[in-house]
Image: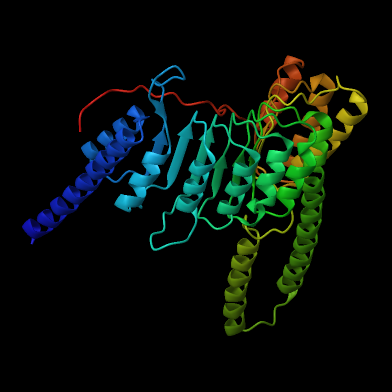
Amino acid sequence: MQKAQSAVSSAADDVIVLRLRALWRRYARYCMQTDSCPSAVLKQDILHQIDKQEPLKKITLSFPDCGPSDAVLPCLQPLLMAIRDERYTHPQEFHIWSLSLKQKDIVELCLLLEKRGRTVYPFKSLELLDCKLTEWSLERLGKAASVSYLTTLCLDFTRVGQEGLKGLLSGGLGASQISSLSLCYCGLGSWSGTLLASLLTNSSVRELYINGNELQCGGAIELLKPVAENSQNLAEIQKRTTSITDGTELISQRSNMTSSRQKKAKIKGRKTKKKKEETKSGYGAAGGPWLKKLHVFDNAIDDSEKDGPIKFTQFLEILCIIVKFSSYLTELDLGENHIGEDGGKVLLEALRDRQAAKLSPIKIQVSTRMSTETFSAILKSAKELKSGKKRRRMKVQYEIL
């Protein structure tokens, strides 16, 4: 019996290795046919999975050794053709770094992502890092996202612009399953606040990373205003529900005429009710815009712009409403936005109100441009957010398949 199981396991491992080798060889062949540079990073990843005898779950297409002056330039087409020809459906993450994507590349990529055709490729995460995309490409990408399995979309270091962001949103991003959206260092200005607020209101996006942009106070106000209003409304509903529940339990405790069978039924009913309440309080249940993670590191949010003090005060008021009332918020990155000593004290008060309401503590990062006492008190009232989004660099080793 053990020998039979071992033979089956060995055969499965052989199939995994054969498919990985076939994927690479076909990719390398298409690279030769199209005069494009093969990715040494992808080659190393495939070799690593062959050693582990495990399918390739994450595809990273990067060309650290290819430059604009090289005779053979990198291209996305060979990999897309190889994946389709081999019907390789194991990967769930697709990372493409520093490529100038043509219209044909985007069309083929979107067709691969969409739930159409005989073979479905269940990619859940797409990262286009430092890629050149046109407004048309962004709109086409939004359409593909609405009929894909994607839950995470990252366009960091890709110039989006106002028309590009409009295209991405109008393409159908709001109708997608995407819950995590990253637009760090994309050249977003204060104009993007209204567009992003509309996205949060009409989509399932609950994690927003927009580090390194220029939202300033005006853009941040427009972005967070509907989130703050919804957080306050949800808190009021929860408070009324809790008050009614407490009153019902008090009446029940005063009653001593309940039979043993009724008590058992009552306990069972409470468990069922509690289970329903837990289900309703889940991340997908609450209506309206709300955020689990908000990263606005380095967005020029301070009082230095025109009408700065007024807008800055308004921004702090809106932000503090979210901090005080949102039971969903887990991360807040305000680093390199110089809120100062007064802003730090206002934020500290909101964090203490959150503690008093017995809401879960949030991980937070703020600028150090305030007194040591205020800065330390903020970190004591929350948890320090240490990990920031950084560009990953990989060392490449050449081996022959």
Instruction: Indicate left or right for 360 with 43 as reference.
Output: right
- In the image, residue 193 above or below residue 10: above
In the rendered view, tell whether residue 32 sits above or below residue 372: below
Residue 72: give x, y in percent of width and height. 38, 24
Front-most of 154 and 104?
104
Where is residue 58? Give x, y as percent.
39, 41
Quick one: quadrant of the N terminus?
bottom left
Q: Is residue 345 visible?
A: yes
Residue at left offset 21%, top offset 44%: 17
Viewer-closest of 4 and 383: 4
Residue at x-position 80% and y-position 46%: 228
**Image quadrant assignment for residue 292:** top right
Residue at x-position 30% and y-position 30%: 44
In the image, 390: left or right of 139? left
Name the image quarter holding residue 80: top left
Residue at 58% in and 32% down: 156
Residue 59 on image: x %, y %: 39, 39
Q: Position of residue 182 (x, y in %)?
A: 61, 38
Q: Nearer the viewer, residue 284 or 270?
A: 284
Whether residue 321 is visible here, answered yes or no, is no
On-image quarter of the C terminus: top left
Quarter of the figure with residue 375: top right
Q: Residue 378 vs residue 129: left or right? A: right
Vertical side of 226 occupied by 332: above or below = above
